[in-house]
Amino acid sequence: MSVLYTFLIIGKNDNPLYEIEFPSSSQKKESTYINQYILHSSLDIVEEHVWKSNNMYLKIIDKYNKYNISSYVTAGQIKLMLLHEKKDEDPIRSFFTEVHDIYLKYLLNPFYTFNTPITSPTFDARVRKLGAKYFF
Amino acid sequence: MGTDVFNKVEKINSELFTLTYGALVTQLIKDYEDIEQVNIKLEQMGYNIGIRLIEEFLAKSNIGRCADFMETAEVIAKVGFKMFLGVTATVIDQDPDKREFHLILDDNPLIDFVELPEQYKHKLYYSNILCGVIRGALEMVQMKVKCTFMKCTLSDETSSDIKVVLEEVLSDMIPVGYD
């Protein structure tokens, strides 16, 4: 079974902060790395879209074969990227908004430094819950 | 009782408060690099706050002298915490000699948003400043106490537990040559 969704958080200087796949696969398959590679290759297009839109949610910004890439850029230039096959905008928009929300809460933790990788298990658990809520 | 006083005192934004305290703790960790030292410093800072705060507390709350140490415990938990932090604590495990009690904090505005990194768990007592405040305040009213954090929710324990032990009651000092 192929991975349906790959979600990445990319920092200000295009550094990876967080990655997750839905549904979560126990062992790393080669395809998941390819998905991340595809997402990273779309970063330049995100930069273009950021200046064209007033919204944080940029919708589908890129396509790669059967995959669509959606993006959401926060005010601090943190990029939330999602690779998906199905084109259903509404759940993706809600997913992004809610992840943004928990990201903001996490940012208030004095032990987390802005623009560094997110290692917290609580954050991870919350994102997983959101993924389960919107994509399955 | 505590609620009345709480309504009287000035309020600040709780996020500002929480973030300021968070910045303070992380800066201390950076400066001292030793968690034990950070705990001690936080306690000392609290002490300095406590010896001032007691004045404000007595002025605003109109509370008179407590009959015994257990009444003191209740006043701290129900009025003191309510007045300055907007939450109340529960007093448990009072010992029969009336020299020791535990304060259980169900809700602590200092630790909103905070997640301790693994390496600090069970070492750093993030809210240790509270111990200092209690010690400082009680010392100003002739009670020398020892105040320690027993448990902390940030280290994955069930509740935040502060132990307060009465060491001695300082006698009211009579100025030299006054009789």
Image (tube, grey):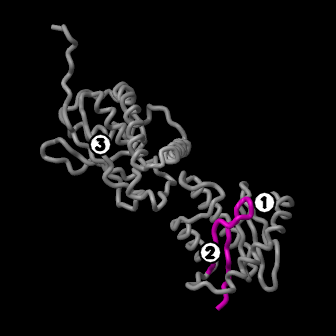
| Nearest to viewer (mark 1 / mark 3) | 3
Please state which of residues A129 and B60 is positioned toward the viewer in this rendering. Answer: A129
| Quadrant of the rendering where the C terminus of chain A is positioned | bottom right
Please state which of residues B166 and A135 is positioned toward the viewer in this rendering. Answer: B166
Please state which of residues A86 and B43 is positioned toward the viewer in this rendering. Answer: B43
Residue A55's disc is 1
Q: Which residue is mark 3?
A: B147
**A8 part of magenta stretch:** yes
Amino acid type, mark 2: Ile
- Residue B77 x %, y %: 31, 42
Counting residues from the start of the chain, the first of labels 2 and 1 encountered is 2
| Nearest to viewer (mark 2 / mark 1) | 2
Above or below A23: residue B102: above
Q: Secondary structure at mark 2?
A: strand
Amino acid type, mark 3: Cys
Amino acid type, mark 1: Asn
- Residue A102 x %, y %: 59, 61
Q: Which residue is mark 2?
A: A20
Q: Quadrant of residue B178?
A: top left
Residue B170 can be seen in this image: yes
Residue B3 can be seen in this image: no
Q: Which residues are magenta?
A: A1-22
**B177 part of magenta stretch:** no
Above or below B35: residue B155: below
**C-alpha distance separating marks 2 and 3:** 44 Å
Q: Subunit of mark 3?
A: B
